[in-house]
Image (tube, rainbow, N blue to C red):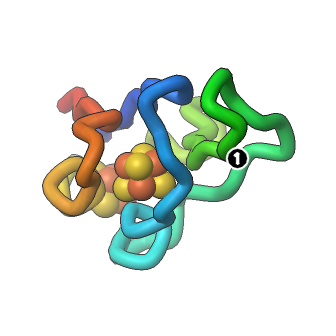
């Protein structure tokens, strides 16, 4: 069981994390952030049991906006 935290105001909306999450657990927010981008988001309640903590999302993120908790 693991989860990630996405710093929505660092996210520039490249969606690499969405593309590379092997479990497809990351989605796009409906609300833009302070920079005007629609950030990636992770629903902890729904996905905590599915996230393996593989860190692929955090490694792929060019803006170091993702932290992984295991
Ligand atoms: S990889 Fe990082 S910057 Fe790109 S969408 Fe995901 S959280 Fe945002
Ligand atoms: S740690 Fe792995 S499984 Fe969890 S959200 Fe990131 S890429 Fe997906």
Q: Is residue 35 above or below residue 18?
A: above
The residue wearing badge 1 is 38
Could you tell me residue 18's position as x and y percent?
A: 48, 67
Image quadrant of ligand 2?
bottom left
**In this picture, residue 12 sits left or right of residue 46:** left
Residue 41, quarter of the rendered image: top right
Classify the position of the N terminus by image quarter. top left
Could you tell me residue 42's position as x and y percent?
A: 56, 42
Could you tell me residue 54's position as x and y percent?
A: 17, 57
Classify the position of the C terminus by image quarter. top left
Disc 1 CB within 8 Å of nearest ligand 1 atom:
no
Identity of the residue drawn at 33% across and 34% down: 65
Q: Is residue 68 above or below residue 14?
A: above
Q: In the image shown, does 16 or 4 lie closer to the viewer? A: 16
Density class for disc 1 (Cα within 10 Å; few <14, some 14-19, many ≥20) is many
**In this picture, residue 67 sits left or right of residue 44:** left
Identity of the residue drawn at 62% across and 31% down: 35
- All told, the count of numbered labels is 1
Residue 56, quarter of the rendered image: bottom left
- Furthest residue to the front? 35
Identity of the residue drawn at 39% across and 62% down: 17
Identity of the residue drawn at 54% across and 46% down: 47
Q: In the image shown, does 36 or 5 lie closer to the viewer? A: 36
């Amino acid at each position: 069981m693991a989860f990630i935290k996405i710093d929505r105001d660092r996210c520039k909306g490249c969606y690499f994390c969405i593309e590379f999450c092997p479990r497809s657990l990351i989605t796009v927010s409906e609300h833009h952030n302070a920079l005007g981008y629609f950030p990636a988001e992770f629903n902890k309640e729904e996905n905590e049991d599915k996230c393996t903590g593989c860190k692929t999302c955090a490694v792929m993120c060019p803006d170091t906006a993702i932290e992984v908790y295991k």
